């Protein structure tokens, strides 16, 4: 009678545990003779069935049915053996990995400041960056509205701020890519998510902000003629502050943009002009010279006038020798000595009378008298919008501030005029 080996039973239990803990592809089940310490080795081997001995001798694997029985088939004990490093541990599955491409991160950041962070798996950071950018843009618009001045034209300020922001973000993203390896894909790493972030958190809000500012804060208007030369010339793209006169009326000497309804004098449209007199003033023209409240406006040729005119561009003249650029001071500004007045503006004054004298006109409270800076064309010429004109306060759109861009009639770009601050 053959006794049951306690060693064999223990090994079978170990095998069942190993099946759960180890991958089946890494296990090997071998048939072997296991000596029974409680019985004689010879008696045990002689009593074993012949079939079991042959299976053991050939090294065939134990049938699967024997795993669930108390005794292995054929009376042969089952032994498990792990062929490999006993300290090996299977790595834990952390998800699909895919390296982040630096060039793609930079491109996405240029498209939207926070999109690069979404690409790197930092969705909340990306949203925060986009919100901070929109807040900065809105703050810039508000600051511009309040201060009315920057060292550079606002377009250059926006471009400089955008370049600085993008440079800092790209530097941070490239550093994160070098440290973040391997990268495990997040649910937000999808084209649909990228598109939604770009459209709804950057493009649409930015468009609405800029559109609102151009409707209620700024306006871009082309100068269609040399009527305001040398201040502006035909082909200038002018930035106009629409909020300048929201709480006050234009003052004497200020440059304004007028949107006049259609009349016998002008067709419906916008044009630039200089305010010479305001409500309550009595004004008339006399030999190309404006008179306000019985006082002729101060005009004089200054040493720097020629250089200033050259920088502002050549105005249209009656003839090459019949006009001269001069400095004019508005009514109420005192001129001391031979120097320039405290507040002044350049005009192109003809040397012979071309504007017909007018009768004195007393302006009502909501009326303004405007005059072009280029006074070399007759007041009676409606196509050039020259000469004095009484307008309503409600027709004033805003105050021109900067020359954003300028192109000549022959298509040549006048880069020297870009950024000129108008006065």
Image (cartoon, helix red, strand yellow):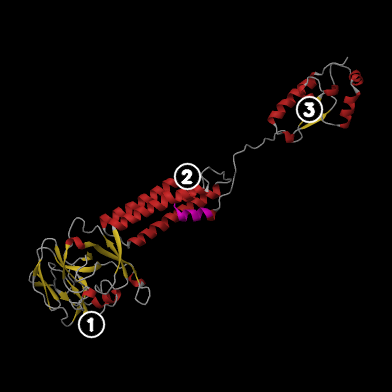
Where is residue 188 drawn, in percent x and y?
51, 44
**Residues tagged 3 and 2 counted as in contact (Cβ below 8 A):** no
Element under disc 2: helix
Snapshot quadrant of residue 23 = top right
Q: Mark 3 vs mark 2: give the one in front.
A: 3
Q: Is residue 111 magenta?
A: yes
Q: Is residue 379 magenta?
A: no
Looking at this view, is 337 or 360 the one in front? 360
Snapshot quadrant of residue 276 = bottom left
Q: Quadrant of the C terminus?
A: bottom left
Q: Which circle's residue, 2 or 1, is located before the other in the chain?
A: 2
As drawn, the label of residue 318 is: 1
Where is residue 150 drawn, in percent x and y?
30, 60
Q: Which circle's residue, 3 or 2, is located before the other in the chain?
A: 3
Q: CA distance from mark 1 to mark 3?
A: 113 Å
Which residue is denoted by mark 3 in the rendering?
Answer: 64
Q: CA distance from mark 3 to mark 2?
A: 52 Å
Which residue is denoted by mark 2 in the rendering?
Answer: 123
Q: Mark 2 vs mark 1: give the one in front.
A: 1
Magenta residue span = 104-113
């Amino acid at each position: 009678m053959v006794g049951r080996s306690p060693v064999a039973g223990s090994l079978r239990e170990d095998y069942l545990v190993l099946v759960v803990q180890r991958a089946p592809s890494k296990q090997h089940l071998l048939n072997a003779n296991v000596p029974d310490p409680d019985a004689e080795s010879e008696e045990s081997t002689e009593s074993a069935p012949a079939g079991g001995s042959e299976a053991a001798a050939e090294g065939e694997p134990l049938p699967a049915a024997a795993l669930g029985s108390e005794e292995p088939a054929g009376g042969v004990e089952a032994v498990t053996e792990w062929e490999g490093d006993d300290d090996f541990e299977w790595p834990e599955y952390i998800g699909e990995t895919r390296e982040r491409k630096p060039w793609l991160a930079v491109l996405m950041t240029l498209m939207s400041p926070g999109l690069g962070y979404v690409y790197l798996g930092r969705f909340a950071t990306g949203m925060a960056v986009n919100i901070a950018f929109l807040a900065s843009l809105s703050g810039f618009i508000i600051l511009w509205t309040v201060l009315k001045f920057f060292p550079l034209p606002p377009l250059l300020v926006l471009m400089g701020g955008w370049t600085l922001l993008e440079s800092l973000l790209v530097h941070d993203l490239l550093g994160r890519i070098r440290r973040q390896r391997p990268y495990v894909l997040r649910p937000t790493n999808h084209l649909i998510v990228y598109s939604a972030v770009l459209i709804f958190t950057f493009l649409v809000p930015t468009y609405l902000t800029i559109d609102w500012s151009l409707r209620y804060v700024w306006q871009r208007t082309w100068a269609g003629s040399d009527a305001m030369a040398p201040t502006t010339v035909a082909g200038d793209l002018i930035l106009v502050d629409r909020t300048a006169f929201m709480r006050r009326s234009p003052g004497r000497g200020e440059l304004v943009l007028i949107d006049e309804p259609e009349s016998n004098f002008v067709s419906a449209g916008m044009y630039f002009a200089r305010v010479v007199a305001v409500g309550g003033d009595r004004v008339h023209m006399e030999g190309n010279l404006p008179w306000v409240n019985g006082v002729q406006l101060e005009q004089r040729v200054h040493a720097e006038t020629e250089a200033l005119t050259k920088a502002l561009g050549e105005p249209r003249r009656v003839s090459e020798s019949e006009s001269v650029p001069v400095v004019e001071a508005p009514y109420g500004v005192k001129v001391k000595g031979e120097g320039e007045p405290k507040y002044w503006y350049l005009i192109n004054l003809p040397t012979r009378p071309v504007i017909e004298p007018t009768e004195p006109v007393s302006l009502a409270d909501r009326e303004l008298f405007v005059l072009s800076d280029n006074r070399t064309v007759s007041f009676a010429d409606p196509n050039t919008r020259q000469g004095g004109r009484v307008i309503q306060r409600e027709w004033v759109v805003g105050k021109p501030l900067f020359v954003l861009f300028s192109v000549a009639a022959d298509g040549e770009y006048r880069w020297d005029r870009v950024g000129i601050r108008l006065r």
